[in-house]
Amino acid sequence: MTTGQTVRLPSVDRILGDAACLALIAEYGRVQTLACARAVLAELRTAMLAGAVCEEGASIAAIAAQMAERLQAQSRSQLRAVFNLTGTVLHTNLGRALLPDAAVQAVVEALQWPMNLEFDLETGKRGDRDDLVEELLRELTGAEAATIVNNNAAAVLLMLNTLAQGKEVVVSRGELVEIGGAFRIPDVMTRAGAVLREVGSTNRTHLADYANGVNADTALLMKVHCSNYAITGFTKSVELDELVPLAAQHGVPTAVDLGSGTLVDLAQYGLPHETTVRETIEAGADLVTFSGDKLLGGPQCGVIVGRADLIEQIKRNPLKRALRVGKLTLAALAPVLQLYRAPDLLAERLTTLRLLTRPAAAMRAQAEQLLPQLQQVLGKSYAVTAEAMSSQIGSGALPVDQLPSFGLGVRSAPGSRLSNPLGVLEQRLRALPRPVIGRIGQDTLWLDLRCLEAAHETAFVAQLAELSA
Ligand SMILES: *Cc1c(COP(=O)(O)O)cnc(C)c1O
């Protein structure tokens, strides 16, 4: 190694004139490339003072290589595609539902073309963006009308603000839900300007409790789906069809925050039954709100369906303008809803349902096939086994139901001297070009294969070699 005094750094001009850097300029632009050259040179100067730079390290080729690496890292999106091996199909932190091809094509077109988003092609006059999916939603839910906003939290906020600002909303104490990410019924109620009138107790609420809670200030009777928890034991709740006559008697509407928007009976696909939007409308709900990216399997959005006069009122609320969805959401939602017209093909075409209904045998075969490859790259410090595990639907849908699944379990091999071996491995998996996200529990790193479809298996295997480093 030569000392700092004798190593000379090339000038910025010479670096930028080099063929490798000209290629970088062509790709990243002159401004960014120049800034990068300066940053690399500044660091080299500091390192030289410490005597930590050799002749080759200060060569134009070495500098250009460093610049290429940096510029590439810098231009990579912070939002990255990952492998979801957590076993939670609708993972909120990993973006929930994956969309079917039909939706992908529609979004690509909407990105590149002007669209009749609010333009009636028949009359040539201004249209309403909700019209693009309203007919489909009416058909699939049996409701009179529909409107779409940014997510279900927005749907609930907008509904409450429109119908109950300055008035009371009756909700059972057993249904004062908190969904992850700060959505809590009492808080949303306050922000909507409505007054929460809690009735009943945590585990038991009777019809008489609702009846006693209604007064001249009541604007709405509301039920909220206990998405992410279950109250068991000595319990009592009031079904919607019992609540509807009470509401009618007092001349107030009923609303249901259904959480997951299930549009078909999931039992026909071998999954647990979840109340559908249609069942809720048929039971007499005046308004129902639900998410687009939970069990429905579409893009992030919130749907409000129900009585035409109430939907009309909601659409006139100025908040609707602030909460409305963009064209990409509508482009994606329409083809997803179309798929529901063919329920017999749904389990094959709707990605979310296809993942939820993957046979355990398929995942087992996959696990057995992947096992030796993973074991080989992990070496002797870890022991990999193929095992049965259970996945969850996620996003608060059917929180207590587990789906039998299969995958790989990785444990620290006996005698391994690594400290926190599973934490280290979990971190190495996250550092892969396409990060792999598993979950740790019971001294095991679980890689649930439910969400690794055959189409993505090659890409998964291809990067495994990088783990052995
Ligand atoms: C998920 C959920 C919400 C929030 O929906 P987002 O689409 O995530 O905004 C609200 N209420 C219930 C009951 C839910 O399950």
Image (cartoon, helix red, strand yellow):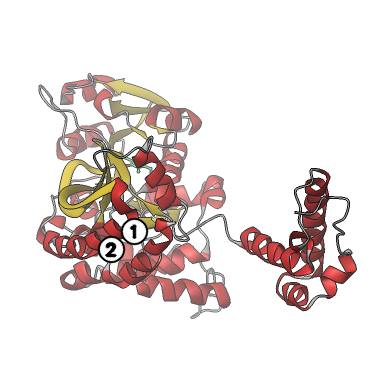
Asked if residue 77 shows in the view, the reply is yes
Residue type at mark 2 is Gln
Q: Name which residue lies at 56% across and 52% down.
A: 321
Circle 1 is placed at which residue position? 377
- Between 6 and 96, the one lying in front of the other is 6
Q: Is residue 25 above or below residue 431?
A: below
Q: Quadrant of the N terminus?
A: bottom right
Q: Quadrant of the C terminus?
A: bottom left
Q: Secondary structure at mark 2?
A: helix
Residue 275 percent across, percent down from the top left:
18, 48
Q: Name which residue lies at 13% across and 26% down.
A: 236
- Between 391 and 202, the one lying in front of the other is 391
The crowding category of the residue bearing disc 1, from other C-alpha atoms within 10 Å (few below 14, some 14 to 19, many at least 20), is some
Please say if the residues under marks 2 and 1 sit with CB atoms less than 8 Å apart: yes
Mark 2 → mark 1, Cα distance in angstroms: 7 Å
Q: Name which residue lies at 37% across and 53% down.
A: 96
Circle 2 is placed at which residue position? 373
Q: Residue 104: which disc?
A: none
The residue lying furthest to the front in this view is 1
Residue type at mark 1 is Val
The crowding category of the residue bearing disc 2, from other C-alpha atoms within 10 Å (few below 14, some 14 to 19, many at least 20), is some
**Left or right: where 450 falls relative to 137:** left
Residue 158 percent across, percent down from the top left:
46, 43
Residue 416 percent across, percent down from the top left:
31, 40
Asked if residue 129 shows in the view, the reply is no
Q: Quadrant of ligand 1?
A: top left
Q: Secondary structure at mark 1?
A: helix
Q: Is residue 310 above or below residue 173?
A: below
Residue 294 percent across, percent down from the top left:
32, 52
The residue lying furthest to the bottom in this view is 122
